[in-house]
Structure formats: structure tokens, C-alpha cells
Image: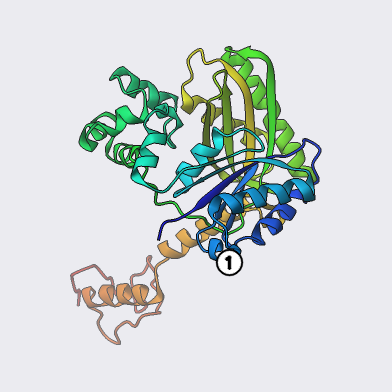
């Protein structure tokens, strides 16, 4: 059975209530239980809901947008397709208050995908798009006409295979209704397009300082950082990195943000805005103490290096066998007097016997 995936992008007001996303989620779950909330939007699997509502995907989408506007005053753009990838791409191109529906047929998918710039495909950043452009591959149609093994030689086995699948409209992603971990975000918009990397780094430091203060005020810690950089042409690069340890300290957040920025290797990029996210938040009471972890590690090493009682006993008996003891003999546990010899005054040497 063909899938029908709805991607919504909400126009949330800057001063929106913190509970508004939860209210929107409950509204969407009135249509289908398969709702995945995203930052500023949502994914819905309408495949099983159409029979219940006795409407097609377009009709349900119109009803969802109407209720979101009537109940909460939230406008939205919508894209409907047979996969989350296509629905997301369609939603990105759709103005607020409108909807774009792509039929789940090879002809409709090809007609939508082939003219699109290759950078609109998921996983294609500035560097990958530049590499493809060097070989004359500017649109999705250009990439779709190239054999998979050629793309793998250009981009690597995994990236080439994924790009080949996406260029043909294939997407195995499913709508995951599991609630996403809580996040915090802060954004800086430049007054003009900014090319100076030093200005970018100063902005990252200010954003990390803001995130750290908000985390400490709410008594939370973050386990990862995501940096989103938007450019003059409307495109964006988004990259995440896991923190060495969950933290709420500005210094660690800033260092990780710098590492993410450096990994992008931007060269004279005209940056319009920078957004920094603190990902997968959890209570600060669950923070890991690195000192305690180090002590536990040292204790485990000491225990592993400590000889067992059985090993000591075997060593004592081994020495006993190599030493010939006259008269009453020697037993494990007897104390030697190295100045006199053994306990009976007899001089002992390893491997020899004196009578």
C-alpha cells in the first residue's frame, strides 16, 4: 500500500507559549497516532487515517491546517508525498497557508525531483554540492542519470549509495512517534551578510554563553550541540556533535561549537544567521561526575592487578619444592631469619641442600 506522509512547517510567533508545541501535538494526534514532532513542524503518517476520515491526503491536510489556525492562530505550510524526504522537500518550497501534494507514482516523483538543485537532497552540504558541480552535476536529474558506482567513486561508498537512492526518490525513513528529547536553541541574525570567520566565532561564543546561562537557570545539562548556519541564498548547513560529557558549562559548549564550525571548512561564506542548539537535555542531578568515574576506573585496575590468594599459595609451594629443608622441615607460614638461615639455623639456598 502506498504511503501518504504529511510534513508541516509551523509559523510559531517569537513570544509563543512554551506549551504550544504540546498542544499542537495533541491536535495532530486527533488525526493519526503516528505523529513525529520536529523543530518548528511535524511529520504525520496519514496512510491509515484516510479511511477513517473518508478523505484523501489533500483533504486531511486542509483540515489539519484549518484547525491549527482556528484553535491556536498558527499558520503552516504543508507538503504531502509518499516518503518523508519528498514531503519535506515539497513543504520547504510551499508558502504559508498553502500545500503541495506529490502523487506517489514514478512519473510524478521524477517530474518533481529532476529539476531541483542537488543541494536540496538530504545529506548534500556545501562541500558535496561543490564536488558534484566540478563534474557538471547540478540538478537531481543530473545525479540520477549517473551510475551508482560512479557516485561512490566520487563521494565514497556509503554517501554515494545514499545519494543515488535519494536522487531516484527512494527513502526508507519512517515516521517515529517517539517524543524527541527536549532541546534549547538560540539564534543570532547578522545585520548584513557576514564573511569574517572571527565574527562567526565571536557569535558562537555569545550563543554558547546564552545557552549555558539558560541551562544553569533551568538546572539542566546537554549531551550534544547542533549548529545551523544559514547563507544568503537561503540554504543552510546543519551539523551536530556529542559532548565529551553532559554539561551546562559555557566553556565546554563553546569548544564543541567551535569544533563543529571548524569541521564545515567555510571559505568566504556569506552567513545570514547562526543558530546553536543544546540537544537531549536532562536534569542536572543525573550529571556524571568525572572524578568519581576516574576513581572507579582506578579501583577496577587495582583489583585486576592484585594477585589472588590462590596465586600466592601456589607461589609459596613452588618455592618450598625448590628448597630442601632438613630435620623438621619447613611449612608455609614459617618466618625466615635471613641473618641465620631458616627457622632451625640451617643455611638455605635455592636448588641446593647442605647437611
Please say if 63 is above or below 186: below
* Total count of labels: 1
294 or 132: nearer the eye? 132
As drawn, 134 above or below 165: above
Residue 169 location, quadrant? top left
Q: Residue at x 51, y 57 (%)?
A: 297
Kindly identify the residue that appears in the image at 65 percent across and 35 percent down: 96
Q: Is residue 54 left or right of residue 86?
A: right
- From the top left corner, tell me how far across and down residue 223 is, in percent: 60, 47
Which secondary structure lies at badge 1?
A: helix
In front here: 341 or 11? Answer: 11
Quadrant of image for the N terminus: bottom left
88 shown above or below 335: above
Q: Report which residue position mark 1 lands on.
A: 52
Q: Residue at x 68, y 18 (%)?
A: 190
> Taking 149 as reference, is 113 left or right?
right
Where residue 299 sits: x, y (%)? 52, 60
Amino acid at each position: 500500500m502506498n504511503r501518504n506522509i504529511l510534513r508541516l512547517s509551523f509559523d510559531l510567533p517569537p513570544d509563543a507559549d512554551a506549551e504550544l508545541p504540546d498542544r499542537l501535538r495533541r491536535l495532530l494526534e486527533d488525526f493519526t497516532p503516528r505523529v513525529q514532532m520536529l523543530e518548528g513542524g511535524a511529520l504525520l503518517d496519514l496512510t491509515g487515517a484516510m479511511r477513517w476520515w473518508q478523505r484523501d491526503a489533500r483533504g486531511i491536510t486542509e483540515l489539519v491546517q484549518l484547525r491549527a489556525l482556528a484553535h491556536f492562530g498558527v499558520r503552516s505550510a504543508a507538503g504531502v508525498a509518499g516518503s518523508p524526504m519528498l514531503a519535506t522537500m515539497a513543504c520547504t518550497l510551499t508558502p504559508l497557508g498553502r500545500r503541495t501534494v506529490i502523487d506517489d507514482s514514478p512519473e510524478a516523483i521524477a517530474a518533481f525531483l529532476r529539476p531541483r538543485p542537488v543541494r536540496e537532497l538530504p545529506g548534500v552540504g556545501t562541500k558535496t554540492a561543490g564536488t558534484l558541480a566540478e563534474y557538471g552535476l547540478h540538478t537531481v536529474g543530473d545525479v540520477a542519470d549517473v551510475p551508482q558506482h560512479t557516485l561512490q567513486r566520487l563521494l565514497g561508498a556509503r554517501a554515494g549509495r545514499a545519494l543515488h537512492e535519494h536522487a531516484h526518490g527512494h527513502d526508507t525513513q519512517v515516521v517515529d512517534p517517539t517524543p524527541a528529547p527536549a532541546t534549547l536553541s538560540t539564534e543570532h541574525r547578522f545585520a548584513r551578510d557576514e564573511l569574517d570567520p572571527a565574527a562567526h566565532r565571536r557569535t558562537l561564543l555569545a550563543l554558547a554563553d546564552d545557552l549555558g546561562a539558560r541551562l544553569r537557570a533551568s538546572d539542566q545539562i546537554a549531551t550534544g550541540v547542533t549548529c545551523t548556519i544559514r547563507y544568503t541564498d537561503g540554504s543552510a548547513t546543519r551539523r551536530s556533535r556529542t559532548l565529551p560529557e553532559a554539561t551546562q558549562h559555557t566553556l565546554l559548549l563553546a569548544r564543541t561549537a567551535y569544533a563543529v564550525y571548524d569541521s564545515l571548512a567555510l571559505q568566504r561564506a556569506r552567513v545570514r544567521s547562526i543558530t546553536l542548539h543544546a540537544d537531549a537535555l536532562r536534569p542536572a542531578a543525573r550529571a556524571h561526575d568525572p572524578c568519581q568515574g576516574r576513581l572507579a576506573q582506578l579501583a577496577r585496575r587495582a583489583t585486576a592487578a592484585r594477585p589472588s590468594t590462590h596465586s600466592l599459595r601456589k607461589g609459596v609451594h613452588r618455592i618450598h619444592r625448590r628448597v630442601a629443608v632438613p630435620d623438621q622441615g619447613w611449612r608455609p607460614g614459617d618466618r625466615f631469619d635471613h641473618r641465620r638461615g631458616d627457622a632451625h639455623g640451617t643455611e638455605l639456598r635455592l636448588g641446593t641442600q647442605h647437611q
